[in-house]
Structures are given as structure tokens and as C-alpha cells.
Image: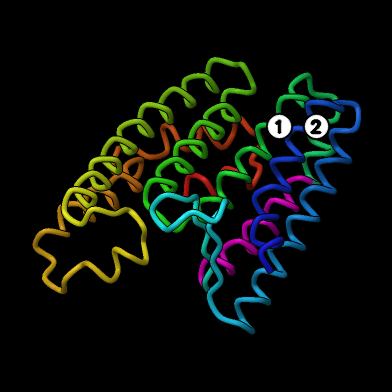
Amino acid sequence: MIDSLIGVITLPLVGAVLTVALPQLASIIGVVSALTTVAAATIVLWLVATAGSISYAIGGWSPGLAIALQADGLSALLLLMTTLVALAASVYATAYFRQSEQRHYYWALWFLLLTALNALFLAADLFNLYVTLELLGLSAVALTSLGGKRAALEAATRYLMLGLIGSLAFLGGVALLYTGHGTLDLPSLAQRIEPDPTELERSINSAITSSHQPRRVPPKWVWVGTLWMTIGGLAMLAITTG
């Protein structure tokens, strides 16, 4: 049970390392890593469906100190959907990047992005959620700039700037919650937060606004369209830009 929960994070991470160590086998490693990650996500969904929510604190530390992972029905479903899309994108990339000079960089960045996204879905506290959002954004920016052309670099720069603004707003919301309740553990916050939303509204609105920051910058097609085109329309960036 715990192996599958950790596997959806470690399998793409190991895949990223192996594609750097064995670049001549990067395409094969990429597809195999994507397949095994789908298998791990399927097991997680099956476990949640049969046994309910599952959680794990890495290192055995108490909540609030450990890197805590938790999977419920929604997160398990999102994991499976994401890994299936990642598998399709990986299979497509084996042909798309066959003659590309950037193929060696692509696979490592792609699986780092998948690692961050899976970790985000399983994060059980707000600080780890913030860290995974940062890793996700940086990986997506690096993938966007992979083409090396001016349009790609401009799109990556816009994405980076908007991501930094959003992350600062999210971090502000995290700080407000920690100041008010003394913990960032999501289950603990659910127990401590009172029904009165007066204090909570500022922090929650700040965090939610940050996660949708790119949507608030008109016109959207100026940077999102360019961003998608520079990667050849791969579905991987659809799950990071929403």
C-alpha cells in the first residue's frame, strides 16, 4: 500500500535520473517509467476505493514535521488521469524528439515535472504543497524554453514572472494560516479552523488567487498560445497551465 503511494513520486524521479545517466536509452526509459507510474497510480486508486483514504509520514515523524503524503478519492483519481496523460505524451515524444537536439534535456525535465505534479496531489501539508508548486513551475518553465527560439524564451519568461507572483501570494496565504493556527498540516487545520470564515478568507483567497494568477492577465492567448506551440502541442503543458 505505502509502496504504491511513494512509487507514484519516486518512479518518475528515478526515470529522470536514468534518462540523464543513459541518454541513448532515454526514450525506452521514458515509456517504461510512464507505464510503471500508471500502474502505481492504478494501485493507489484501487486501495483508496477499497480501504478509504491512505496516508504516510516519511521517516515516521509526527504530522507537521514529516513530509506527509495522503491520498483520497479525488487525489487518487487525479493521479491516474495525470499519469495516463503523461504516458500518452511520453509515447508521442519518442517520435517527436527522435531527431531533436533537445531530446536529452526533455526527458529529464518532463519526468521532474511529473514527479512534482504527483507529489502535489499527495501533499498533506501546505508547505510541501508550496514546494511542489515551485518545482512544478520551474520544470514547466524549463520545458517551455527548451526550443531555444525567441518566442519560446519570451513565453518562458512570462510564465516564470507570473509564477513568481502567484507563488508569493500563495506563500502569503500559508503564512497567515500558520500565524493563526500554528500548523500547516491539512488534517490538523481542518480540525482547528472554526466555521467563522472571517480570518480564513484572507489566506484562502490569497492562495486560490495565486494558483489562478495567469488567468487574470489579459490577453491570455498572448503567452499561453505561444507556450503551447513551442513544445509542439504536447499534452504535458495542458495539465500544468490548466
Left/right of residue 116 with respect to residue 94 in the rendered view: left
Choose top left, top right, bottom left or bottom right for residue 54.
bottom right
Real-space CA distance between mark 1 and mark 2, rounded to the nearest whole angstrom: 6 Å
Amino acid type, mark 2: Thr
Residue occupying image coordinates x 43% and y 31%: 159
Provide residue 145's location: percent of width, then percent of height.
Answer: 57, 23
Choose top left, top right, bottom left or bottom right for residue 185.
bottom left
The residue tagged 1 is 108
Left/right of residue 124 with respect to residue 217 in the rendered view: right
**On screen, residue 68 above or below 77:** above
- Residue 241 among those drawn in magenta: no
Provide residue 65's location: percent of width, then percent of height.
Answer: 42, 49
Residue segment shown in magenta:
73-90
Residue occupying image coordinates x 70% and y 62%: 4
**On screen, residue 215 above or below 225:** below
> Of the numbered discs in the image, which one, if any, rests on residue 167?
none
Amino acid type, mark 1: Ala
Q: Name the one closer to the observer, 81 or 191.
A: 191
Provide residue 88's location: percent of width, then percent of height.
Answer: 75, 52
Helix, strand or loop under label 1: helix
Residue occupying image coordinates x 71% and y 68%: 42
- Residue 84 among those drawn in magenta: yes
> Of the numbered discs in the image, which one, if any, rests on residue 19?
2
User: Quarter holding the N terminus?
Assistant: bottom right
Choose top left, top right, bottom left or bottom right for residue 95.
top right
- Mark 1 near mark 2, Cβ–Cβ under 8 Å? yes
* Residue at far bottom of view: 50
Residue occupying image coordinates x 73% and y 48%: 11
Helix, strand or loop under label 2: helix
